[in-house]
Amino acid sequence: MKYSPWSHEAALVLLATLREEKGPVLMALQLMQKEFGYVHKECVELIANSFNKSRADVHGVLTFYHDLRTAPPGEHQISICVAEACQAVGARGLEKEVKAKFGNETTDAFCFGNCALGPAVMVDGKLIGRATLAKIEKARL
Amino acid sequence: MRVFVPCDSAALSVGADEVAAAIARLDSTIEIVRNGSRGALWLETLVEVETPAGRIAYAPVRPEDVQSLFDADFLHGRAHPLLLGKTDEIQWLASQDRVTFARVGIIDPLSLDDYRAHGGLIGLRKALNLSGEGVIDEVTESGLRGRGGAGFPAGIKWRTVAQTYSNQKYICCNADEGDSGTFADRMLIEGDPFTLIEGMTIAGIAVGATAGIVYLRSEYPHAIATLQKAIDIARASDWLGSRVLGTTHSFEIQIRVGAGSYVCGEETAMLESIEGKRGVVRAKPPLPAIEGLFGQPTVINNVLTLSTVPMILAQGAHAYKARGVGRSLGTQVFQLAGNIARGGIVEKAFGITLDELVNTYGAGTLTGRPLRAVQIGGPLGAYFSTAQFETSMDYESLIAAGGMLGHGGVVVFDESVDLAVQAKFAMEFCAIESCGKCTPCRVGSTRGAETIDLIIQGVRVDENKKLLLDLCEVMTDGSLCAMGGLTPMPVKSAMINFPADFTGAAR
């Protein structure tokens, strides 16, 4: 997935688009991550200043949600659903296989809503049903 | 010539886009309609051809099957190994009672003309001719209860909001469908998003709210995109905006995207998250109906609850409540998931047995090995054994059986499952997803996982089982919300229904 390189100025322009929103902090963090791939360390202060919040408020939101990350992601992102429905069709075994091969780019997830066609895996934003290591490798190319 | 290839996420996950592309490549004159899924997910990708005799189904189609479909002249419904006949006559689908899902898989999700041609907007027009009170009476009369899991009567909630004075009220749709084994909200939004928009508009008119918010989880990117397009279309027509269908009513809808937190499906945590804060649960009272989003009176309903309202208005409360049993009226959109041969959506009147769902519709396990356990109602729901398969699937019967309906998900496991491991996972999941506000949930879940681990290892098994049950009681009675309060349900039901897995001896 392609992201813009971090830019203080670009971040300010983006944050300005949320000026009319009520309760904008989480949206702001999501917007930063969508644009730059992660929430850069300057974002906490930028968002706090933009929306008249304390840095503690923003930091609290940033650290609560699993989706938000504070370091740039790798070239590929693999999320394996390890919730019950996928466990029932071998997600734990698949998780071991995938982590042995792509450990540094693999994270656990809880449910993509593809529970009748598990194991479900998201590779670079694309959902794969009845996932196998071979299918994941193919989607990762 | 029209050919239907679903664009539901589940179908896409097994190659629907590739199938559609292959069809387009072989005959560029065909109009390919990207419908939602019919719900028979084990048949995806299910391709339909429109013929004078009706829609003819071929499934499951893989991209490499497309050439042979053309060779067999599938465009005229001719024979092929994947031919299933008329879609409407496939027993699995024909025997269902599709009400909330009536249009899903049939229409083009983003065609307002299609929506109108299949009964769309009739409910809203009726609502506009009634008073707010009249709409609420109809919803109350229908017996519709919250499909998110709590089962609270929708009409009573709406009446509370209607009777609370405020300049700004909100309709919040909870689309944070985090329970494993559930996907009905996603499929409805991807397959018939206008129904949700219509239901929310009706709710707004009924209670005097002009702003609607859909809290939609980030794990559903396709649903987010589809719903946003549908909202834009409704806004560009005479529907959403300052004059709803030419009346003086005003209604707007905005999507707020979740950020990967399970507890944000709890209604007050959801409100906090929409307000841009940490998803920490609020104490009740005050009820959200009185002091909800930004402190204002707020209707919070699940996607399925709101999406059932248009049909109730269109066909009347009596038609809806003629279905079901006892105080569980109407239909439930069950979701068959996990290790199941025929998974997908089964919408039936309440009162179908678990056996009929899992064995008749589900056709047993995917692996073909004996079925051992079924978890109903998501990660906080109970594990049932096959001895309980005659249980009627309705709110009260499931509670009486030690479980709950939840959002209607049914996850099937074969004989390889170890229920002690599943019980431990329930506690671990709670530890990961707890908002941290109350101690029984925040600390109890970690202690619970440790204690089950000791049982699995065979350490002081009887003593630890007793301790675990004690801990479960504290979590049930002492937690602030359903996250900590219901995590003991899978744990205790596993212990009760599968005692052999809690003896400390390796299975």
Image (spheres, rainbow, N blue to C red):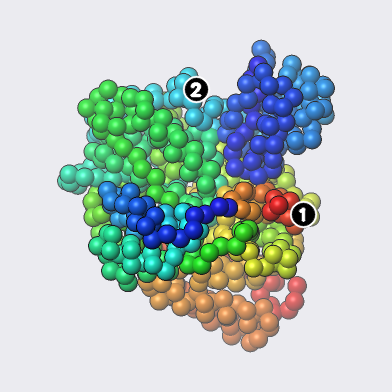
Name the subunit of mark 2: B
Q: Amino acid at mark 1?
A: Ala
**Up/down of B275 relative to B51, above or below:** below
**Point 42% across, 59% down: residue:** A7
Q: Which residue is mark 2?
A: B114
In this rendered view, identify the residue nearer to me: B345 or B376: B345
Identify which residue is drawn at 64% across, 30% down: B5
Residue A74 image point, x, y percent:
60, 62
Q: Which residue is pictured at 52% across the width and 38% down the height?
A: B190
What secondary structure is marked by label 2?
helix
Question: Is label 1 on the same chain as label 2?
Answer: no
Sort mark 2 into few (<14), some (14-19) or many (20+) by Cα contacts within 10 Å: some
Q: Secondary structure at mark 1?
A: helix
Residue B53, position as x, y percentages in the image = 67, 14
Indicate which disc residue A134 carries.
1
Q: Kindly indicate the quadrant of the structure image that contains residue B286.
A: bottom left
Separation of residues labelled 1 and 2 (CA atoms)? 40 Å
Left/right placement of residue B279 relative to residue B53 reads left
The amino acid on which the numbered mark 2 sits, given as a three-letter code, is: Asp
Could you tell me which chain the residue with mark 1 belongs to?
A: A
